[in-house]
Image (cartoon, grey):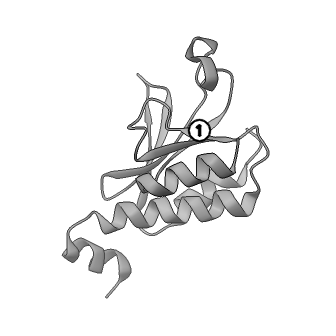
Amino acid sequence: MHHEWLDEYLLSFPCVEKDYQPVWQWFRYKVRGKMFAAICSPGPEHKTFGGHDLLNLKCRPAEGELLRAQYPDILPGFYSDKRTWISCLLDGDLPEEVLRDLCGRAYDLAVDSLPKYVQREIKGT
């Protein structure tokens, strides 16, 4: 993977936990049980996704469409709901600042989907 900073960055968000899903061979990043990111390397049998290091990120449906139109290295989510997930090719040309921004947005979406009292706990308010 060309983005060694990514794991540390994803884990730097409040209350994030990382686990490994052996069946899918995914490293998953969750906030209070809600997944917002995953890193995987699909095999060649997965056509467009195969042979690439991928970062799957949660996103809003309209935002996902715009991002895919703007960046060739952003694809519909691999093995995910293609409306609400995107896959970023980590071996592509996406700028680091774009990846960091998308990670923050994905995290915020996951937090916003949690009950209000949990959101307050996470935000410390």
Drawn side of residue 37 relative to residue 84, left or right: right
Give the vertical position of 100 relative to 91 (above or below): below
Drawn side of residue 54 relative to residue 11, left or right: right
Amino acid on which the number 1 mark rests in the picture? Leu
The residue at the point 70 percent across, 55 percent down is 5
Drawn side of residue 5 relative to residue 101, left or right: right
Give the vertical position of 15 relative to 52 (above or below): below
Could you tell me residue 84's position as x and y percent?
Answer: 40, 47
Q: Which SS class for mark 1?
A: strand
Residue 93 in view (yes/no): yes
Q: Nearer the viewer, residue 20 or 85?
A: 85
Residue carrying label 1: 75
Give the vertical position of 41 relative to 17 (above or below): above
Could you tell me residue 19's position as x and y percent?
Answer: 43, 42
The residue at the point 57 percent across, 54 percent down is 66
Could you tell me residue 50's position as x and y percent?
Answer: 63, 21
The residue at the point 75 percent across, 37 percent down is 91
Residue 89 in view (yes/no): no
